[in-house]
Each structure stands twice: as C-alpha cells, then as structure tokens.
Image (cartoon, rainbow, N blue to C red):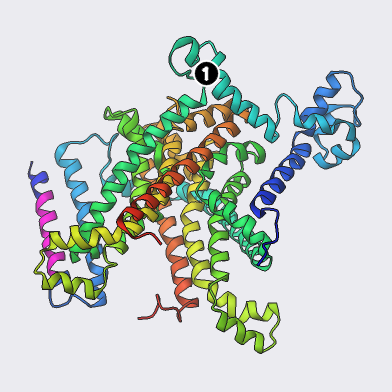
C-alpha cells in the first residue's frame, strides 16, 4: 500500500495558531501604535488620542490600514508578536550570558537577569518537591494497600485535599514557613510536593493492586511474607503505573514551584512573571512563559524516556 | 503538658476506634465507611487544637481550629462577598464558558480526523503546561474585575476538558457504530443516542478535574490584581496584616467551595451515568 504524503497535521495546527497570534496582535496593539505614529508626525484617522480611546480596536484598524505593520514591532506591545517573544527569549538567555555585563562570560557566574538563572532556580524547587512528593506518595500507597484502616481513613481525605485549591494558598504557606525561619528552597518544594503526591498515590495504589489472584496465590504457595510479595511482585508490576503518574506529578510540581515563587521575589520564573506584570513588560512575561513551557515539555519527555528504558530492561515494553 | 499528652491520647483512641471499626464485625457497612474518615478528620482537628495550645505555638504561625471557626463565624458577610466575587463570578462563569467551548471544540475535532490528529497532541501538550502563568497577562488585558479571572479559568479548564471529551467520544466499539449504521441513523442521531452517553464518564472526569483548576485559576489571578474583595485578595491582604485567623477562614471557604463543587459534580455524575460499571453497586 502506498502511503499518501500528507502535510503533518500538528505542524499545520501550530502554523495556524501562529497565524492567529499575528492577526490578534494587530487590534490588540493598534492604540499604542497609533499614539506612537502620531508622535512621529504621521496622520492617523481620528486625530486625537481622546477620540481613539473610546473607539473599538477593530474600527481603528480598518481606518488606519497603513499602520498595521507596526503592530508587530511596537516598543511596548499589549500582545507581543511571536518573533518579538523569541527575540526577547534570545536576549535574556544566550545574549545576556555571552555579552551582558553580569553574564557568564564576563563575570563567571550566571546573570541574575537571565532566564537561564531563573529557570534553574525554578528547576531546583521542582526537583526537590517532586522527590519529596513522589516518595511520600509511594510510601502512602504502600501503607494504603497494606492497611485497611489507612485505606478507609486516609484515601477520602487525600481526595478531598485535592479539591482544595492549594496552589492558591501557596503564598500563605511560604509566609508561615518564613516566619518560623524556613526560607529559600524548602517552602516552594513543599507546595510542589503537595501537588505531586496525589497523582502518585492514586497511580501507585492502582499499580500495587494490579497483580491478579493467580499471581498472589502463587506467592502464597511459596509461603512468601508481605515484604517479599511487595518487593518481588507488587512493586515490579506497579512500575508502568508509577511512570504514568510521575509524568503528571512532575508537570504539577513545576506549576507548584512557579506559583510558590510569586510572593517571594528571590528569583525563579514565577518571580520573573510577577516583575514583568508590575512593570508592564509583556515580552518578559511571555518569554518566562515560553521558558516554563519548554521546561515542562523537557521534564515530561525525560520521564517518558526513563519509562521506556526501564520497561525495556524489565521486559515489559510493548 | 497535659494538653500535649491528651493530644496523643486522642490520637491513640481515634486510631484504636478506627482499627476496631475497619476490622471488626461492622467492617462492610455503609456507616463504617462514612465513620472511619470522619473519625480520622476529627482526631486530626482535636490534635491540632491540643498541640497548638499545649506547645504554645504563636497564633501568627498556626492558629488553633477554634480560633479559625470564631473568625469564620464573625466575618460571614465579608466572606460571603468574597465567595460571590471569586467563586460565583470568576470561577463559575469561566468554568461554564471554558468547559462549554471545549465540548464544542471536541465535537468538531471528533468530526474531522485531520483536526484530531493536529489538535489532540497539542491539547495534550498544553494540558501539561503551567497555564497559571498566563494570569498576569490576562489580568492586564481584561482588567482587575471578575472578567480577567474568568478568562484565566477558561484557559485552565479548556485543554483537560477537550482531551477528556475527545477520548470519550471515541469510546464506542465498531460493533455499536455498525449497529447505528444499519439503523441508517444520521451523525446527529448517532451522537445523541450512542456516542454522547458513552462519552459521559469521560466528560465527567474532565468536569471533575476542572472544578479544582477553576478555583485555583480564579484565586491565583487575584494575586495579580483584584477589586477589594475576593478570596485571593482576602488571603494576600490578611497575610500582610498578619491576621492569620482571617487567612485560614478564607482558606476554609475555598476548601468548602472546592469540595462542594467537586461533590456536586460527582452527584450529577452518579445520576447521569448510573449504568456505568464504576457506579454500580
């Protein structure tokens, strides 16, 4: 059978999204653009800024088609065009480290204005929180599988704990921990851990219970103790479930770290976003957002790669 | 000291009671299933109260539950206004718009295979992204009112809902679809009579995930700017004033709202998907 060549659908969708973005940037930025053009001496349709303020963005676009091109290169855009964000991303990572006064080349340490530094701060908290959260989740799952009391008393509360919007309470946790002298990495990691433990608990409980009756009976005929059953049967058969939940957990843990950085302005992507929002630097927010998205993609991909390698080693790969 | 000791006594008593309930003669009754987590929760609350009092923890760090309850009872009108602002106006409207839009998109995606292969990987990718990060941008676009909170919520619930609904709409066997085909049923009829009911468990899964996301989005967005009411505003300003009782009261409101929202969705699910294997007794 010959395979008909098709334009890859994902690529088409991404291109369509970028196109939409450029289109949306025109009406979003038109007021700023017209103000700048007026100052530069060009004639714009309603001459005074006061009239323009009360008009809709779209009608301004149609009255001033000549200014459309400037929407994608304005100094302080409300919606920066994709290439502006990419330029900002380049400026605040590679360019800042290579040529900046405080960059890696000149000063020997990462610049505190670069996204590389802030990304690493966030990544640190993410990893620590992920580690705490997944260990706690696994321990809790082992307990739940082995003890009926824990299953009945802890599981409903674990579910209820997830209906509480804890991310929103992150600032409080940080301030409280700060007031008893804990600061820096730990408070952020606590929030990350809280977000990442639940998917691991649910996945692991399912995984540890996945061995069927035949397998459990076989272990019983060997007169295996609970510990042996756990290490030789339950844990190995829960590995696919574990990796599936770890993928969710690490994405959640990144969200936790970013939100945890909002109240304490001591570096990190979340701090960058808040700073950008205070000073109206939209490009800075978008660049931090892109960085966070890239981090999330890399982390999930890394866990997926580890999953593939582990399952192949264990002979469980499909 | 006696309070600390009695805290551990309470814990031991609660644990022993649960142990007896869970393994004793009444282990499989519905009452036990309800009582065990209740006793566990009550034990934790009592221990919290006794430990905070016994160890003399300053209320600035951790107020005892009784103080939180007092603040909660004394500030009901304020908290109700916050609740209306954040939950009813911000979260709920965004939730309805976002889930509705995702549902309609899912119908489109399901209809056209090209869209499915293009949008679904993107949707899966977006669902893993820290979308909370768009909150400062949206607050800047839509202002400090509830509209910007609703916009954040729309973005946050859209992708999980989309992915779940599309997965649900595919959850019919070819036998079932063939049967509908032999009945000469149209696309609309197949959708209404076969595929939507089959998709309901997945749709409700998406709706339930989205309840928590909606609350998170609405509250976090308030940290970037809000009118002088709202749960996020209350939390951040009360922290500034070190009024920890009020902070915890606001947390209590959001926790109650989150649990009620989730519970409501679960109840609705049970009514509408009573036929599904996971709901049968």
- Magenta stretch: helix, strand or loop mostly: helix
The answer for which chain carries disc 1 is: A
Residue A307's place in the image compared with B38, above or below, is above
Please give the range of residues in magenta. B7-20
Q: Residue B92: x, y in percent?
A: 55, 56
Dividing the picture into quarters, in which one does residue A259 lie? top left
Residue B98's place in the image compared with A107, above or below, is below
Q: Residue B234: x, y in percent?
A: 46, 40
Dividing the picture into quarters, in which one does residue B226 lie? top right
Q: Residue at x 67, y 59 (%)?
A: B115
Relative placement, left or right, of A62 versus B17 is right
Instruction: Classify 10 Å Cα crowding around label 1: few (below 14), some (14-19), many (20 and above).
Output: many
Q: Residue A154: x, y in percent?
A: 25, 59
Q: Is residue A200 visible to us here?
A: yes
Q: Residue at x 50, y 49 (%)?
A: B128
Q: Mark 1 highlights which residue?
A: A97
Q: Residue B204: x, y in percent?
A: 50, 67
Between A175 and B168, which is closer to the camera in this rendering? B168
Q: Residue at x 69, y 32 (%)?
A: A83
Residue A306's place in the image compared with B21, above or below, is above
């Amino acid at each position: 059978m010959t395979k008909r060549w098709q334009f890859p659908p994902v690529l088409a969708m991404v291109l369509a999204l970028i196109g939409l973005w450029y289109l949306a940037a025109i009406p979003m930025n038109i007021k700023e653009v017209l103000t700048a053009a007026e100052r530069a001496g060009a004639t714009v349709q309603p001459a005074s800024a006061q009239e323009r303020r009360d008009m809709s963005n779209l009608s301004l676009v149609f009255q001033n088609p000549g200014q459309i091109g400037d929407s994608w290169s304005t100094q302080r855009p409300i919606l920066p065009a994709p290439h502006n964000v990419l330029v900002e991303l380049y400026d605040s990572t590679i360019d800042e480290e290579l040529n900046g006064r405080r960059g890696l080349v000149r000063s020997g340490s990462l610049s505190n204005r670069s996204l590389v530094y802030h990304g690493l701060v966030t990544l640190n908290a993410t990893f620590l929180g992920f580690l705490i959260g997944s260990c706690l989740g696994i321990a809790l799952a082992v307990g739940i599988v082995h003890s009926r009391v824990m299953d009945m008393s802890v599981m409903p509360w674990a579910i209820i704990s997830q209906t509480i919007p804890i991310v929103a309470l992150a600032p409080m946790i940080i301030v409280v921990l700060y007031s008893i002298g804990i600061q820096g990495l730990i408070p952020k990691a606590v929030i990350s851990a809280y977000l990442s433990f639940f998917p691991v608990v649910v996945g692991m409980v399912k995984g540890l219970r996945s061995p069927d009756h035949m397998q459990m009976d076989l272990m019983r005929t060997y007169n295996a103790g609970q510990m042996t059953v756990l290490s030789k049967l339950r844990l190995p058969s829960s590995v696919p479930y574990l990796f599936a939940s770890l993928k969710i957990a690490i994405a959640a843990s990144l969200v936790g770290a970013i939100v945890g950085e909002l109240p304490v302005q001591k570096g990190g992507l979340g701090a960058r976003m808040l700073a950008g929002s205070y000073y109206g630097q939209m490009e800075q927010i978008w660049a931090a957002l892109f960085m966070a998205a890239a981090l999330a993609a890399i982390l999930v991909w890394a866990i997926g790669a580890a999953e593939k390698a582990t399952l192949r080693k264990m002979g469980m790969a499909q | 000291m006696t309070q600390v000791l009695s805290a551990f006594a309470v814990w031991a008593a609660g644990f022993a009671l649960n142990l007896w309930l869970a393994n004793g003669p009444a282990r499989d009754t519905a009452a036990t299933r309800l009582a065990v987590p209740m006793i566990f929760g009550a034990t934790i609350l009592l221990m919290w109260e006794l430990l905070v009092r016994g160890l003399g923890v300053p209320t600035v760090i951790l107020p005892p539950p009784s103080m939180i309850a007092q603040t909660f009872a004394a500030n009901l009108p304020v908290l109700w206004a916050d609740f209306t602002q954040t939950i009813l106006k911000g979260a709920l409207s965004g939730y309805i718009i976002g889930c509705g839009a995702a549902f309609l998109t899912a119908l489109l995606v399901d209809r056209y295979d090209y869209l499915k292969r293009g949008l679904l990987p993107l949707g899966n990718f977006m669902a893993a992204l820290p979308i909370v990060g768009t909150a400062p941008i949206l607050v800047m676009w839509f202002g400090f009112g509830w509209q910007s909170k609703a916009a954040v919520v729309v973005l946050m619930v859209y992708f999980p809902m989309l992915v779940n609904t599309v997965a649900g709409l595919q959850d019919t066997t070819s036998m079932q679809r063939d049967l509908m085909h032999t009945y000469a049923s149209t696309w609309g009829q197949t959708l209404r009579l076969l595929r939507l009911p089959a998709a309901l468990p997945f749709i409700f899964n998406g709706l339930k995930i989205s309840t928590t996301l909606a609350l998170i989005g609405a509250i976090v967005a308030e940290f970037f700017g809000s009118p002088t009411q709202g749960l996020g505003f209350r939390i951040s300003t009360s922290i500034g004033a070190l009024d920890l009782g009020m902070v915890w009261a606001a947390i209590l409101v959001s926790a109650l709202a989150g649990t009620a929202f989730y519970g409501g969705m679960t109840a609705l699910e049970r009514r509408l998907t009573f036929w599904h294997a996971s709901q049968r007794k």
